[in-house]
Image (cartoon, rainbow, N blue to C red):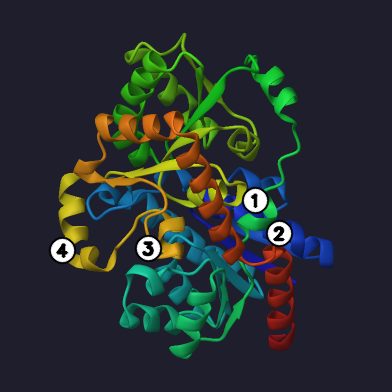
Amino acid sequence: MKLFMSAGEVSGDMYGGDLIQALRRKDPSIECVGMGHHQMRAAGATILADVTTASTIGFIEPIRYIPRLLRTYYAMKRALITQKPDAVIVIDYQGYHQWFATAAMRYGIPVIYYIAPQEWQWGTEAGGRRVVGYTHKIMAIFKEEADFYTRLGGDVTFVGHPIRSRICPQMSRDAFYAQEGILLDKRIVSVFPGSRVQELTHLLPIFLPAVASILTHFSDVVVRISVASPVYAARIQAAMMAYGLTDRVALYTGDSHELIQHTHVSIVSSGTVTLEHACLGVPFIANYRLGRLSYAIAKAVVGSKITHIALPNNLAKRRIVPEYIQDDCTVNTVVAAATDLLSSPAKHARMQDELRQVAASLGDGGAADKAAQVIMDYVGKKK
């Protein structure tokens, strides 16, 4: 069996890597080729293209990457012809994959969507029908997602969220603190600035001054900044130098789940990392900023449908963690929210409990193994 796997973001590459490993546990002869990043390559896929550094959100920001994405799109279309896969597995990355999946269907190749567009959350039924129209099979990671696409006529299997199985930190607190050179009487504040250049551009100028203020007010706090991909390390270090934080803050390039596990409070760019914190019961502050024009367009198009930006808040259907978007995301609001959680053990404990309740709704684990079996069963019937 030969599968064409396609992921365009760091998180999609991570889940793609897990899926490839699960497939090969079931059948070591399975061959995987396609578009991805480090983790899919490490899992054994032949990577023909990598656009993770071109990943962005918004209406204006992606324009600069259009030539690169178009070159990649046409190259991957040609690869579908030369590689002759038994199926195409697309992972998240809606903007690109709606075109690529449609092209694969025209070639008569079955298309399976893993981590499908979240039309059920902030889209429309019309958008959901379009997704159903360019996929043969959807492997849903949320129960509401499965119900939504099934109702619209999709062939859907609920597999649960893959994040549940990925989170298994092993290091004790003492071992982690020793590794990082942190005294045991200190509390860690972690910063997760995102996995897109756009996020670093818009959020580091908020997060870094906020960190400086927190360090001034809390003598028992140390700060670690998580680097989503090695390609961003130099950019983050340069920003730290500009804010005079080089000697006071350290970058963290290890397993992000180990860092989250031993963090007291995190400041994050809203995305998958919010679910990782929920699964580990670690309080955080969610933030997001777009370019002004992109935000104005987004607000006009879908603003009324978006009640929360943080996934745990969306799943809980209420605000259980602080979240700030666009002009509400400021140094002052981030510092105030962090100060609140650092100063109040009761608020910190309550948020921990509420996040664990959200985590319980993400399935019982094993999503990659379940998805692998769905793929093998579906493709097996088509061959």
Marks 1 and 2, how far apart in space? 7 Å
First along the sequence among labels 3 and 4: 3
Q: Secondary structure at mark 3?
A: helix
Q: Say which amino acid is labelled 4.
A: Ala
Residue depicted at x 71% and y 18%:
178
Which of label 4 and label 1 is nearer to you?
Answer: 4
Q: Mark 3 = which residue? A: 95
Q: Mark 1 = which residue? A: 40
Marks 4 and 1, how far apart in space? 37 Å
Tags 2 and 4 touching, CB below 8 Å? no
First along the sequence among labels 4 and 1: 1
Q: Mark 2 = which residue? A: 20
Residue depicted at x 33% and y 68%:
122
Q: Say which amino acid is labelled 3.
A: Gly
- In which quadrant of the rendered image does the N terminus lie? bottom right
Q: Mark 4 = which residue? A: 300
Q: Say which amino acid is labelled 2.
A: Ile
Q: Say which amino acid is labelled 1.
A: Met
